[in-house]
Amino acid sequence: MRLSRYFLPILRETPKEAEIVSHRLMLRAGMIRQEAAGIYAWLPLGLRVLNRVADIIRAEQDRSGAIELLMPTIQSADLWRESGRYDAYGKEMLRIKDRHERDMLFGPTNEEMITAIFRSAVRSYKDLPKNLYHIQWKFRDEVRPRFGTMRSREFLMKDAYSFDLDQASARHSYNKMFVAYLRTFARLGLKAIPMRAETGPIGGDLSHEFIILAQTGESEVFCDRAYLDFATPDATTDFDDVAGLQATVDHWTSRYAATSEMHDAAAFAEVPQPEQMAARGIEVGHIFYFGTKYSEPMGAKVTGPDGQERPVHMGSYGIGPSRLVAAIIEAGHDEAGIVWPDAVAPFDVALLNLKVGDAGTDAACAKLQGELEAAGLTVLYDDRDERPGGKFATADLIGLPWQVIVGPKGLAEGKVEVKRRATGARETVAPDAVPAYLR
Ligand code: ATP
Ligand code: MG
Ligand code: MG
Ligand code: MG
């Protein structure tokens, strides 16, 4: 992509309304634009990151055996009357009337709808277990939308819903998501710690929030530092291995980690002092087993092996991709701008032409762009007629993992410069050797 043809509305001034660094950088780097309080347009650069985050989430959901579908954003109030949540949900729900005066709503979550889809199609235990998910926009009329896409009113969510015959098998479904989440956050370059979270009226221990430690986080959390060094389950994990998955979950819940709602000061005091972390964190995911809370009132029943009908056991599992984009920036930035992990960077390489209009430099850049793209890398080629200082600042601000800097002086000596954004390390390389160097 040539920057001269791209749409990258960089802001020079630091926006005053942005209180935290990720919000400032997302605005400055031309990733998002606020359209109304807590409602954002995703501009081209931001959308590329959002899509990459969603793709990693999708790949790990699929690996665990979950199946993707797509439910609408607008739902009928009648569904929510069946579960009793239409009145209970409160002001976070955006309620709408259509032209026939029918009560509709912009979905804040999808338990009711997925339960209705399930009950219309599944009758027997032979069709279980199932886990269905989608990645869809949600609306919650948050009292205090703030921090950009970290707490917005319209936001993207991956929400998965599992269906099982009984609690034992529901636990296996829960464990699959637990492990898929560990893998997902690790692939996003994040250290997310599963913490015991409130379960609501059903109780039990099957609710975890996945939390990234950050000063700007809105949650107060308590955990054992040891989690920061725990190894992530690898790609060969067998999601059908019931005992194996349980062992992984047992390991990842063996130390103390709880959100403030579940905090037990006495148990925390038993963690060796230097290992104790009382910190702030960002909730990036939440998994939850809630049994027959929706299947019972909504009549989502299956026949068991004994011929008896019973309500299915369900769980729901959310991740916020749009919140994650901000969280990744909170975890990866410096004074000059964003530092993207390779896995989610909007482009792999910023190719900087320091003398646009100089035939030799233009030709060398065009050739490099072609070769890098042929090697499978995505390139944002800064071909604007601008001073080098401005180009360096833009490249640092948008945080692409590699910068390839091409100017007539270097070319005369058969060299270009390659800079790694994360470390600032620079190396001179022959132009032909750049693709191999970056691989
Ligand atoms: P919070 O405690 O931050 O309000 P929540 O517990 O209400 O979040 P869940 O219902 O558990 O959120 O939704 C699953 C995920 O969706 C969250 O873990 C988070 O990643 C994301 N999410 C929830 N609310 C928002 C929001 N207002 N803006 C962006 N992402 C959100
Ligand atoms: Mg909330
Ligand atoms: Mg929460
Ligand atoms: Mg939650």
Image (cartoon, grey):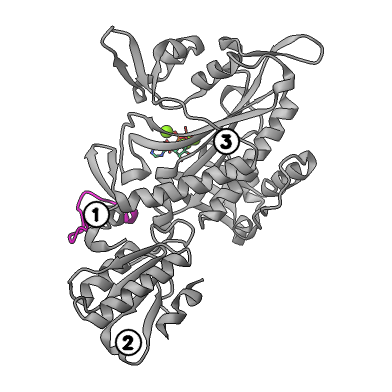
Report if the beta carbon of the residue with label 2 is closer than 8 angstroms to ligand 1: no
Query: Which one is earlier in the sequence, the residue at label 2 or at label 1?
Result: 1
Residue ID for mark 3: 287
Nearest the viewer among 169 and 346 is 346
- Spatial CA span between label 2 and label 1: 29 Å
Q: Amino acid at mark 3?
A: Ile
The label number, if any, that marks residue 411 in the structure image: 2
Position of 293 with respect to 430 (left or right) is right
Judge whether residue 381 is colored magenta.
no
Magenta-highlighted residues: 6-22
Q: What residue is rendered at 39% in x and 64% in y? A: 339
Q: Amino acid at mark 2?
A: Leu
Q: Are marks 1 and 3 in contact (CB under 8 Å)?
A: no
Q: Secondary structure at mark 3?
A: strand
Instruction: Specify the farthest residue to the right.
Output: 306
Q: Position of residue 12 (x, y in %)?
A: 18, 61
Q: Is residue 266 above or below residue 214?
A: above
Query: Which one is earlier in the sequence, the residue at label 1 or at label 3?
Result: 1
